[in-house]
């Protein structure tokens, strides 16, 4: 919208110069005041009408939100109309027509630019014929022919040059869009897994390391979960690799829908996935992973009826000073423990690695001192 408004403001100088020519001609006695007033109102209303339509946002639904083609046709038409009335000042109006063509080459397509140039030449030809027919004394046919040859050829050449420039602009714009799409594709390939659309390992590593640094600064909790699809090789071998891909994609979509928006899921390798849960303790992380696990058991996969998949998970909470390798290693050990206990379950690393409780130091035996007096009978005093 800002660019469109700036373009319209830049075109206003053509109207201002044109109006200056009108009223200067009135001052010189070359133009009748009523006709100058009519041209002034037509110019002002045209410009304000286009400006209001663009500024309101109504034109944003159109292919050309600035209304360049109709605006240019009306503006050039007003200039040609002024050409028929300005006597010896006619040549200055043709310069304004040329400026209008130059302005339009930044908005129109090549074919539109050529059409606008031809329309300008046709309007000039009509004005020359009308003047030669109605006022042959002050505007003889030889003068009209000279104006048309010089002015028409200038406008035609200018429109051809403008078409060429517009064609280059369109080609550069197309190449820029293709380059932008290629960069988006490269960025997608560099940050996301091609099959599942999840983050890839490198991107997750960068995010997790940044989250660890943030945790060390503000002391917040952070947990990760390492997930492994159970018996995935069996699915590939017996149901086919297409079924394996369906399981991977289905699980990825399910994980993104169940977990929080701030949680990140990455394909860590093969059928392994790493889940990053910022500001979440290990206990809450296990609750979230259990919800994901239960939902995964119920997933159905299009084109593979009866196919079911589960996963095992190891969960670890980050400790101050942890590196990502240490954190993932603890989660991996917890994952191994979940597999050892029968799969399709989640285990926490801290539960496995909790240090043994310290046995309190034994108290001295006071029983002899508290024994009843009869127990000491017969003892040597």
Image (cartoon, rainbow, N blue to C red):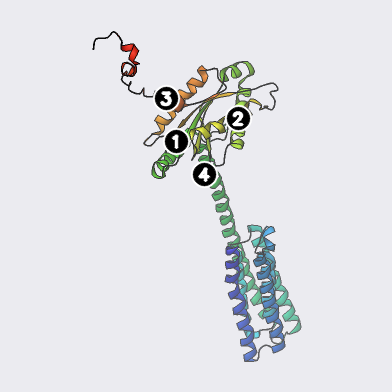
Mark sitting earlier along the chain (1/4): 4
Marker disc for residue 251: 2
Q: Distance from label 1 to label 3 (Cα)?
A: 24 Å
Marker disc for residue 353: 3
Residue named by callout 1: 205
Secondary structure category for the residue under label 3: helix
Closer to us: mark 1 or mark 4? 1
Residue at image location 42% in from the left, 26% down from the top: 354
Left of 362 or right of it: where is 311? Answer: right
Closer to us: mark 4 or mark 3? 3
Left of 312 or right of it: where is 297? Answer: right
Secondary structure category for the residue under label 4: helix
Which is nearer the eye, 153 or 179? 179
Residue named by callout 4: 183
Q: Distance from label 1 to label 4 (Cα)?
A: 22 Å
Marker disc for residue 42: none
Q: Distance from label 1 to label 2 (Cα)?
A: 21 Å
Q: Furthest-right residue in view?
A: 134
Closer to us: mark 4 or mark 2? 2
Secondary structure category for the residue under label 2: helix
């Amino acid at each position: 919208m800002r660019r469109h408004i700036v373009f319209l403001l830049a075109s206003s100088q053509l109207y201002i110069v044109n109006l200056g020519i009108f009223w200067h001609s009135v001052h010189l006695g070359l133009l009748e005041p009523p006709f100058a007033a009519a041209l002034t109102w037509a110019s002002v209303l045209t410009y304000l009408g286009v400006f209001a339509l663009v500024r309101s946002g109504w034109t944003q639904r159109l292919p050309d939100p600035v209304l360049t083609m109709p605006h240019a046709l009306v503006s050039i038409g007003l200039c040609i109309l002024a050409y028929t009335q300005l006597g010896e000042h006619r040549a200055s109006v043709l310069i304004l027509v040329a400026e209008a063509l130059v302005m339009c080459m930044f908005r129109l397509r090549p074919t539109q630019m050529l059409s606008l140039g031809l329309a300008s030449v046709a309007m000039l030809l009509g004005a020359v014929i009308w003047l030669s027919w109605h006022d042959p004394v002050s505007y003889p046919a030889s003068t009209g022919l000279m104006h048309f040859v010089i002015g028409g050829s200038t406008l035609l050449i200018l429109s051809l040059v403008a078409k060429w420039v517009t064609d280059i602009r369109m080609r550069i714009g197309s190449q820029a869009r293709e380059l932008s799409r290629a960069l988006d594709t490269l960025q997608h390939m560099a940050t996301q897994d091609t099959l599942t659309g999840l983050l890839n390992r490198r991107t997750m590593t960068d995010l997790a390391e940044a989250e660890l640094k943030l945790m060390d600064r503000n002391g917040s909790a952070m947990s990760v979960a390492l997930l492994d699809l159970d018996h995935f090789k069996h699915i590939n071998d017996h149901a086919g690799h297409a079924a394996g891909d369906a399981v991977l994609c289905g699980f990825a979509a399910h994980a993104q829908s169940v977990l929080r928006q701030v949680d990140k899921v990455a394909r860590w390798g093969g059928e392994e996935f790493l889940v990053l849960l910022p500001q979440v303790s290990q206990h809450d992380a296990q609750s979230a992973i259990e919800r994901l696990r239960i939902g995964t058991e119920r997933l159905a996969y299009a084109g593979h009826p009866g196919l079911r998949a589960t996963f095992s998970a190891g969960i670890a909470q980050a400790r101050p000073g942890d590196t990502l390798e240490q954190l993932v290693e603890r989660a991996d050990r917890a994952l191994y423990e979940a597999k050892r206990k029968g799969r399709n379950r989640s285990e926490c690393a801290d539960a496995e690695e909790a240090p043994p409780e310290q046995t309190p130091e034994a108290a001295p035996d006071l029983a002899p001192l508290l024994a009843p007096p009869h127990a000491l009978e017969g003892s040597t005093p």
